[in-house]
Amino acid sequence: MKNFRNYWLLASVLLSFMIVVSSCDDDDDDNPTNEVKFNNLALTGAAEVQTPAVMTNGSGTANITYNKDTNIISYNITWTLGNASDKTVGMHFHGPATRTQNASVVIPITLPNDNSSGTVSGQTRALTQAEEDQLLSGMWYLNIHSSTYTGGELRVQVE
């Protein structure tokens, strides 16, 4: 009878342990479900949709996070124009457009200066439902405008 009691005691302890372990929340989530991340997006002149084509060796990288709870985009963008004597004259989110289309500015990005290279981080205003739908379906792009290529020197589709 003593062995039977020990068996049930051991089984109860193991079952309790399994319940506790399985109910633990993993606090190490790298990507909360309310965030959509677009990491290491490469800005290039080849992605520009212009005639004549943009001929630049400039480049950049964008890391963008969209928070579906706040409807706000957070961004960190680093770029270098193809000509060191050029000035960066604008940076914007555009949409809606596919990779082969141009679109109007939706949200401008305030530049820290007009240098030919730099890094800018910040947040946008809250997006409307229609804007969120466009962004999450890959219909927005990021464009960097220069004094040589006023229509845009570097571009990347946010997808």
Image (tube, helix red, strand yellow):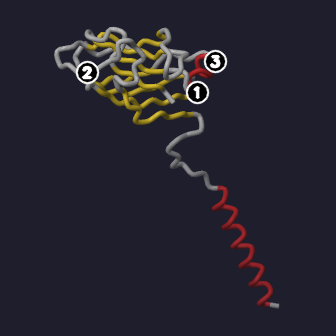
Q: Earlier in the sequence, mark 1 or mark 3?
A: 3
The amino acid at mark 2 is Leu
Q: At x 66% / y 56%, what residue is drawn?
A: 23
The amino acid at mark 3 is Gln
* Disc 3 target residue: 129
Q: Are marks 2 and 1 in contact (CB under 8 Å)?
A: no
Query: Where is residue 133 shown, x and y percent of the image?
Result: 62, 22
Left or right: where does residue 49 sit relative to residue 97?
Answer: left
Would you call the spot at circle 2 few (<14 residues within 10 Å), some (14-19), or many (20 or more)? many
The N terminus sits in image quarter: bottom right
Would you call the spot at circle 3 few (<14 residues within 10 Å), some (14-19), or many (20 or more)? few
Q: At x 54% / y 29%, what residue is drawn?
A: 67
Residue mark closest to the camera, 3 vs 2: 2
- Is 51 or 69 nearer to us in this picture? 51
* Disc 1 target residue: 136
Q: Are marks 1 and 3 in contact (CB under 8 Å)?
A: no
* Disc 2 target residue: 81
Q: Earlier in the sequence, mark 3 or mark 2?
A: 2
Residue mark closest to the camera, 1 vs 3: 1
